[in-house]
Structures are given as structure tokens and as C-alpha cells.
Image (tube, coloured by chain):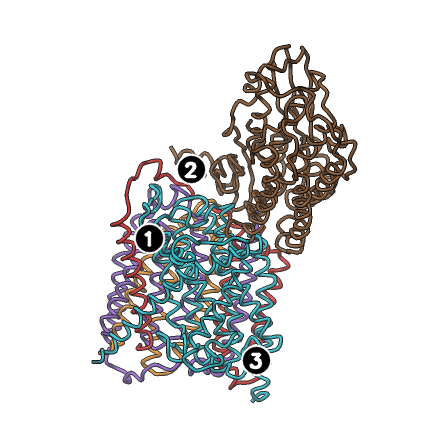
Amino acid sequence: MADAEARKVIEMGYGGNERLAMNMGPQHPSAHGVFRAILTLEGETVVGVDAVIGYLHRCHEKLGESLTYVQYPSIASKTDYVAAMTAELAYVAAVEKVGKIEVPKRAQYLRVLAAELQRIASHCLWLGTWCLDMGGALGGGATVFLYCIREREGVLDLFEALTGARLLYGFHQVGGVRYDVPAGWTQNVRETLDLIDSRVDEYEAMLEGNAFFLVRTQGVGTISRELAMDVGISGPLIRGSGVNYDVRRAEPYSSYEDFDFKVPVETAGDCYARYRVRMQEFRESIKICRQVLDGLPEGPISSRPGVKSVGQVRVAKGEGYTRVEGARGEIGAYIVADGGPKPYRLKWRGASFSNLSILPHILIGTKVADVVAIMGSVDPVFGEVDR
Amino acid sequence: MTVPDAWYLGLSAVLFAIGIVGVIVRRNPLVIFMSIELALNAANLALVTFGARLGSPDGQALVFFVMAVAAAEVGVGLAIIVVIFRSRHRLSVDDLSLMRW
Amino acid sequence: MTLPPIAQTAVAAFVLLNVVIGLVTYVTLLERKFAARMQSRIGPYYVGPHGLLQPIADALKLMMKEDVVPSSADRWVYNLAPIAFLVPCVLIFATLPFAPGLGLADLNIGVLFFLAVSSLEIVGLFMGGWGSNNKYAMLSAMRGVNQIISYDLPFVFAALVPVVLAGSLQLSAIVTAQQGLWFAAYPVIGQLGFIAYLVATLAAENRVPFDILEAESELVAGFRVEYSGMKFALIQLGEYAHIIATSYLGALLFLGGWLGPGPAWLGAGWFTLKAMLVFLLLTWVRWSFVRIRVDQILAISWKLMLPATVLLLLVTAFWVAWRSGGGA
Amino acid sequence: MSAYLPVAIFAAFIVAFAVVSLAVAWLLRPSRPDPVKLMNYECGAEPIGSAWVQVPLGFYLVALIFIVFDTLAVFMIPWALVLRTAGLPAFWVMAGFVGIIGLGWLYAYREGVLEWK
Amino acid sequence: MARAAFVLVALLAVGAALGLVIKKNVIHGAMFLVVNMASIAALYYMLGAEFLAVAQIVVYAGAIMVLFIFAIMFLIPGKDETGPDPRRWQRALALPLGALLLILLLAVVAAVRGTGPPAAGPATSGALYRALLTDYLLPFELTSILLLAAIVGVMVLAKRRPG
């Protein structure tokens, strides 16, 4: 059987019998989870990509229909487990929109703070794993990875102090947030931010002064502006291709209009441009966090009292879609409510899923080594792709 | 208990014969190529043996140049095989009875 | 009670083999500790005081591991590959003199022997990659052949610079020639030669940034992806032996080998110190760079390293020839 | 001969070490094969065909040129050793040699063969 | 001692040569060629030509690597020398003819044995180096032109696409 398949693969190509079909994933060191790309190779050059997803499918949308508005936010964080805060935010924002529920100013600010810290943490992991993809677990990549994980740990410690959890928080709830800041926490946040701010300078010095890093990233995996718009990618990817689009700016939510920040845009569209965008986002996020801390208003953290029963929140019949800017791009949640304690239908728009669809367009013609570099620069999280 | 020169020459003869038989028997041009290398090396061995017997560096110098020639030959020969393969997609010397393609 | 010469040689060879194996096991620990420091970690710590027994634990673990031979592999080629890989890698130690007279065989074509035997490593590597019938291993082997042949030449030419300066291929003679001044200290020529040697070494030993053979984020582990247990250990051993031997050669060719202050018996210590310095230099590079792509690696070799080293060699030769009498 | 005897003995020891350590490991290790375990690793998916397929030619043109430069390296060694006694004339011999081969390198450079497409 | 070593190496060389010719698999053939080349290098050393021994390894190790690559490139699964052989009878003649050649060559060797001047011992490598740059200066220099021709030839041939 294997032989027959091999022959099929060989005869598949146009005239040549020099093609090799190879699985890259699901169990691959740089599959970023469980992604399977069936690459067709001519020597080292990729001539065909077939993506297989769904290895991490957990029926999130069905779960959303069977869990109540009170229960689901902590499950929502499991879609994008690297940046759980923004996933929760997307869900509760959708519920609040459909149910026309007010959110106190302090809660909005805390949500922004959590989202931006989460973006920093997520970008730390991205930078580390991306360098790991290019530099190897037994090389310079591992060094950057460990440095980045160190920084991410700092942010996770803050989250732990805030919510008691390090990865999946359940921080958001309909109508506000669940926990107020503990004593002395804001000071810790400031210190961590200062540290990360200085470390980002170090990373830039380490990577941008490194000729090998530059040749691996510049001009690799270029996404043109038109292609980016056509495929519908979002987040740092589309901003790396010269499109100035950021949900925080285009459609401000959760009081983002109160803060002064820049939306970084690069025009080259290659891996390096995406890297630059994310590095600037580090700085912008830090800036936003400081503004939040400076202007954090007093007041309640939720417009609804604490949780007494799981069926406590009921939303009137209606439907609505909200989107937030996650670390990877636009995360959307669409809810159809039927008046009960659970939504009738929940639909997720995962940023990684849409971003991943760019791969077939830019992988063809690259080398095997570029495949992992490009995959890393897209920064997919498979919890969010497969849901 | 030194080894007599004749032993080296005998070995050289055996290897040479095997190389020639390989050239005739096999159909894969690559193997034929390797067989030619084999025969070439057998001849080199004989040259070095004679050089040692005469006590002059001439034998070794000759082998030295043969190596250079062999390198050039391997390069060009393989390139020719590449060209043939590209135009025929077959790998049997029996198909190559014509001096053109 | 003196032993017959052949028995003496056998004892010496046995001792050398054990020294090499001991060196390799502990140099891996050194590298891990060094890398850990670079990455603000501690490194192996729990097995023995400060993790000193870690290499032994690793070796035992590898011995106890099940040996999985893929059913579709070419069994003969697959099983012989670790040995074919190990032998040239360790054999190059045979010609290294650790101190005056303290070496197995100070051949009068020492450098050439070293270069020739170390280039045979590719055979074992290729056998492993091809014999596994694994696509990653296969791609790795193809990359390996290309990369190693590409960097063999700059490596040879860079290593010939000290040979031209010393006028001998014998390793001990090269050290003696550095009595006045280490070759690395020769203005311009020495430094460029040393740098070229280091770069070519990185590539020839498949270290990051040139470790496209192993490339675990693309090719998982390259040509040894299907190896496990002791066979994997032998390949690893060979690889590290090769790196260490090349470090020793670098220290010998450019840094004056065993020359150093203090009594003569310190020579071996000085030599090892210098070799470890070279090794740590390579390790430092390894843990700070990302890996580059195949085509870029080859372009660097053919467009830059090859002409540069040949020119360097010619310049060195001109200087030596001019100084030695200005022509006959 | 005598100088190489230690080398031969050393080589024999290395082979012996490899064989003995493999044998010891063979005694110590478990052996529980099963068909899935013995399958080739291809990221956990069933391998698509054999790895033994053809590899495109174009990429390895540079390998053919390598043989030529390898010969250059071998030619340089005797020259490097007699340089001191032969002096500048020997240098000019090799300069010419390298110059002529350099033309080939230049041609290859301009043809783009040195790039790995 | 030396004779035993010779017999060992010679057996290795002959075995590898036979393996190359007999084994169907091109890759195995290339590996046998490596063994053969290495044993011939050992024989060179026994004959006192230490430089040649190492040069043999350097040049042929390189060449072998390239052969490896090409062996893979030509390895077409299932197509390697199978199917009916159109010239079977011609090939069958190869063996007796090869044997005849061998007998002739061995006869020549046997005939020259013991004649000629006594073995003068090997020339030193130093003598070889000097000879290469004095007596053999012209061929030495001309080799560069040969190699240049090889480079250009390789590129002209291999870069051409079938028309």
C-alpha cells in the first residue's frame, strides 16, 4: 500500500518524479500545537501545501450553547489559551452587547489592563517560540526562548496574584470583572512593566543586530497588501502588510478611546515586518498599561452582584457580534440569545484560524526552513484554530 | 617479512578485472562509472608499486596526476549522465546506442 | 618488566580511547553548564554534586533504552551507520599530540591525516540518513552532503595557513614553529585565518548557525531521528569527539598548542585549556545565533569563504616565500 | 608502517568499543517491538510513501564543481611544503594555478551555479 | 605481520569491489566503493606513499559524496535494473572474458616477478613534493587548465535544459 501511495505522489506532479510528500505535524517540534501540513517538496522547495486542522477540536461552540452565561467565560479562555484574557473579553462583551448590560468604568479599565498585559505575555511567548523555530532548541533560539519565558512568567505572576490562576483565568464576567486588584498589585505591575520595557530593548539589540536573524526574516513570507485584505487576516499580520487596521482604534471598546497609543504599521509584509510590528506593540501595550494604572477610577468592578447561581444571568432575545483585538488579531464572538440563561448559538471568529489561511498563499516556493519561520511569524494558537 | 611486489600487482590485476566486468555487466551508468573508478584505482595501485620498486617518486607523481584527471572525469561524466537522464528519463546504457539525443 | 612495543602501543591506544570518551562525556556537561549560564539557568544539578554525575546517568539511560529499528529501514546500512560515523570522528585523535611526545602517533602528514579522516564522517552520516528511510533523515543527509562538501574546502584552506607558515604537516613541528609567536598573533593573516577556521569548523561540525543537518525545528533531529538508545549515543559521541578534536586542532594550529608559561609538564594542561577556549567560543556562537537557511549557507561558502580562504592562503604563501629568500 | 600501527590499533579499539557498548546495551535494554512503534517517524501521521525518492538535480550542480576544488586543495599541499625551499617561483606557479581555476569559479559565479536555487 | 595485514586489506578491497559489481542497489554500491578506496589508500601507505594515501581519501571521499547524491537522484523506486535484459547473452560473455583478462594479467605479473632491479624502497614524500614542482612542473600547471575545462564543461552540460 505504501508503495502504491508513493507512486501516486510521484506521478502527481507535472512530469517530474522528484517530489516528496512529507507530513509536517501533528507531532512536530515546530507545529505550534497540533497542526499537520502535508508538504510536497521538490528537493528543499515547497511546491504544495495541504493543511490539516482539527486535532484540537473541543466543540467550543457547542459548549457555548450548553453552558450558561455565568459558566462559559472561564471556558472561553480555553479557546486561545495563550492569550486567555482577550478570548474571555470577546465573549462577555458579546453577551453585554446583546443584553445591553452596562459595565462600570473601573471594570472597563481593568479589562484593558488585563488585555494589554496579556498581549505582552502572548508576544513574549511568540517571540520565544519563533526564535526557537528558527534557531533551534539547541541553539540561539533556545536562549531567546528562555529569556522570553522569563518575562512571560513575570506577567503570569501578576495574573496569579490577580485571579489565582496562571493560564486560564475566568477573570471576566458578564457586567464586569470578577476580582479587584489586590493590595500593592499596581506597584508590582509598574515594576514588571519597567523591567519588560528594558528587556524589549535588549531583545531588539540582540536580534536586529544579528545578520543571521535578518537574512532569515527579511523578504521571507511576504504578504502583499492586496493579499492580506483578500484573505482577511488581522492583527499584527495585516499591520505588517501596510494596512492600518486595529479593532482598538477602528471600533473602540472597553474605553480604549480614553488611551493614547499608536497603531504600529510596517509596509514590507515579510516576517521581519511582522516582527517589528509586534515589538512596537510591546511598547504600546506597556504605554497603555501605564495609562490605565495612572487613571484607574474608583468604583464598583461589576454592574452585577457576585455569582449566586449559574443561571443567574439571562439575556433577552436578540443577537449580536462583538470583536476585540487579541494578541493575534481580531477575535469575534457572535451570540444568538433566546431569553434563557444560555445562548441559543455561539459562533467564534478565531484570529489564528483566519490568519492561518494565508499559509498556502505564501508557503509555495519557499524552502523547508522558511516554512517554520513563516509559521512562527503567523503565530497561530491551535486552541483557537480548532476550537 | 615484507610483502612481495607481485602480491600488489596481483591484487591490482584482480581489481582491474572486476572493474572491467562491472562495466560490461551492469546497465546503470552510475555503477558503470564506479566500476571505471575501480579499474582506475587498480591501475594506480600498480603504478605506486612500480614506483616503490624503482625507488623514484615518478610512480607517485603519475598517480597524483591520475587523481586530478579522475576528478575532472567524475565531474564531467556525471554531468553527461545528468543530461542524458534529463532528456530520456531512463537509466539504462542500452538505450544510448546513438551518439545524439 | 617492559612490555613488547606492540603491547605498549595497545595500552597507549586504550588509554587514549578512554581519555577521549571521558573528555567527550564531560565536555557535554561543560557545554550544558555554559549554555545554562548564558540562558540564566542552572543546568544539570541533581545527579551528583552540582550535576557532576549527569553524563554518566545519561550514558546509563541511553544504554537501557529500547532500540527501535524502523521496519522499513535498510537494516544493514542503518545498523552500521553509527559505527561508520564514530570511527573517523574518534580516529582523528590518534594524530593529536597533547604534549611533546604525548600522543599516539605524531604522523608527518598529521594535518592532512586529520582533514582526510574527518571528512570521512560524511559517509556514516549519509548512511544513517539514507538507511533510516525517513524523510527528515533523508533531507538532512542531502543537506549534510552539500554542506559538508561546501565547507570542507574553506576548512582545508584555513588549516593550510599555519601549514604554510610552519612549512610542515607534522603537528608537533607546527607547534615548535610557534615558539616565538603564535600563528593567531601574526598580523592580519593569523587573525583572518583563525576566524575562517572557526567559521568553517562551525559549519563542518554542524553547529548553530549552520546546524541545518540537525535542524530539530524543521527536520526534527535530522539524520539521527530514527536512532535511539546506544546507537544514538554513539552518534552523539562521535559528533562531540569531532568537535573537540577540531577544537584541539584549532588550538594547536593557531594558539600554539602546548606552549605556555610554567614547566613542561603543564603543556597538556595548557593545550586542553586552549582547546576548551576554542570549544567555548564555538559554543558561545552556537547559543547566540539563529540557524540560517541551506541556500544562504552554501552561498556564504562558495561566494565568500572559498575565495577568501584561497586568497588568504596565497597571501600567506607569498609572504613566506618572499621572506625565505626572495626566490632562487 | 610503524607510525601507522598505533593508528590501526586505535581504530580497532574504537570499533571494539562501539561493538561492545552496543552488545552491552543489547543485553540491558528491553525489546518490545510492535508494528506501530516500528513505523517510520513522520510526525505521528502514517508516512506517505517511502523516503527513497529522487531528488532534483539542479540543486547539486555545485557538488560537481566541488570535486574540482577538492583537487585544488590536494595540489596545494605539496606546494605548501616546498614553498620555503622553492621560494617565489613556486609561489607564482600556484598563483597561476589558482588564477586559472579562479576563471572557472568566476564563470560559475556569473552563471549562477553557486546559488542553490 | 605485514603479509597478514596485506591479506586482510586485500580481501577487504576485493570483497568491496565484488560487492559493488554484484549488489543491485546503487547506494550500497557507493558504500562498497568507499571501502574499496579506503583499503587502496591503506595499500598505498604500505607501499610508502603516505601522501598519496591521504590524498586518495580526500579526493575520493569528495567524489564519493557526490556519487552518493547522484545515486539518490537516479534511484527510481522499482526501476533499477529490472525487467528483461535485451542483451543478456552479451552480458553472459562478460564473466568468461573477465576471467580471461584476469588470467592474462596474472600471467604478466607472474612473468615479471623476480626480474628487474631489486626493490629500491619507496621514495619519500618529500621527494615527491619536490618532483612535482620541478620535473613535473609543466603537467602540474597544465592540470589547472584541465580542471578549468572540467568546471566549464560541467556547467555547460548540466545547466542545459533538454530542448
Q: Which chain is purple?
A: E
Q: Which chain is orange?
A: B
Q: Quadrant of residue B48?
A: bottom left
Pinpoint residue C324: horizontal percent, then vertical percent: 56, 87
Element marked by disc 1: helix
Pinpoint residue C194: horizontal percent, then vertical percent: 56, 70
Q: Is residue E110 visible?
A: yes
Q: Which chain is red?
A: D
Pinpoint residue D19: horizontal percent, then vertical percent: 28, 57
* Colour for chain C in the figure: cyan
Say what amino acid the circle numbered 3 marks. Answer: Phe
- The numbered mark 3 sits on a residue in which chain? D
What residue is shown at x 77% (from left), y 38% (from top)? Answer: A261
In the picture of the structure, the residue carrying the numbered disc 2 is D49
Q: Which chain is brown?
A: A
Compared across the picture, whether C311 is left or right of A265 comes to left
Q: On screen, C128 above or below C25?
A: above
Q: Are marks 3 and 1 on the same chain?
A: no
Of marks 3 and 1, the one in the foreground? 1
Q: On screen, C4 above or below E149?
A: below
Of marks 1 and 2, the one in the foreground? 1
Residue that sits furthest to the left in the current view: C1
Q: Are marks 1 and 2 on the same chain?
A: no
Q: Residues within 10 Å of mark 3 (few under 14, many from 20)?
A: many
In the picture of the structure, the residue carrying the numbered disc 3 is D91
Asked whether the residues under the numbered discs 3 and 1 touch, taking CB atoms below 8 Å apart as contact, a structural biologist would say: no
Say which mark, if any, is on residue C60.
1
Q: Earlier in the sequence, mark 3 or mark 2?
A: 2
